[in-house]
Image: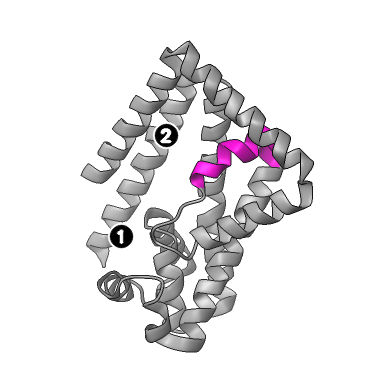
Amino acid sequence: MRRQVLLAAVIIALAALLWASASLHSAFIDALQFSKDYVESQPLVSRLAFVVLAALSAMLVLFSSIALVPVAVYAWGQGETLLMLTGGWFLGANLAYLIGHLFGRRATLFFVPATTLDHYAELLTVRMSVAEVALLKLALPSEMPSFALGIMRYPLTKFWPVLLASELPFALWAVYLSAALIENRFAAFVAVLLAGLAVAAVIGRRLLRRR
């Protein structure tokens, strides 16, 4: 819970600084416009790169595609960004699942720390329902459960609904936050940010206690 509170405080402080300073906000919009101009000059390559980076963020602990979402929303709009972000995360999660399923724990350790992987393997079981796994995946770092579920041979017919139920809400949250940031809607940004972090924290704590 402390991590969520600290994260929220840092993000809100940075956003407030951005909106409080006209020069910083102008520089932010200029940077978005510069990115948009480049993206529009390379439409296919830029879209492919965004999807690939989103997929990698669903597999690598130290990499996140969230910072790229405002650029994508400014360039392509909320609808297209949502589709590409969800698609990239879905692809990356499936690749993580397949690595765990086909090559086991040893190959997975190239992507995630052993202690963290073991911790998630203890939390997850094949007997858990789709809803329970989806909630746990929604509340915890997305790359970890995919590897663990692949290793334990969680049925693929259940894994896909888990992905849709866990990735889509987070993608919607990220896209809406980016749109609020771009459109200078500070109150909406803070409210949605805090609501999302609070929901994730509550779900995570309850599920961890049950496990």
Residue 102, horizontal then vertical, whole percent:
51, 87
Circle 2 residues within 10 Å: few <14, some 14–19, many ≥20: some
Residue drawn where x is 66% and y is 52% of the image:
84
**Can the viewer see residue 164 in this picture?**
no
- Element at badge 2? helix
Q: Find residue 137 and name its label.
A: none
Residue 195 lies in the magenta stretch: no
Three-letter amino acid code at the position of disc 1: Leu
Residue drawn where x is 69% and y is 34% of the image:
36
Give the Cα separation between the discs numbered 2 and 1: 21 Å
**Can the viewer see residue 50 in this picture?**
yes
Circle 1 residues within 10 Å: few <14, some 14–19, many ≥20: some
Residue drawn where x is 46% and y is 61% of the image:
134
User: Which residue is denoted by mark 2 in the rendering?
Assistant: 193
- The rendered magenta stretch, by its main secondary structure, is classed as helix
Nearer to the camera, 78 or 20: 20
Q: Quadrant of the N terminus?
A: top left
- Highlighted range, magenta: 66-79
Q: Is residue 154 left or right of residue 72?
A: left
User: Which residue is denoted by mark 1 in the rendering?
Assistant: 207
Residue 176, horizontal then vertical, whole percent:
56, 35
Q: Is residue 28 above or below residue 164?
A: above
Residue 153, horizontal then vertical, whole percent:
47, 84
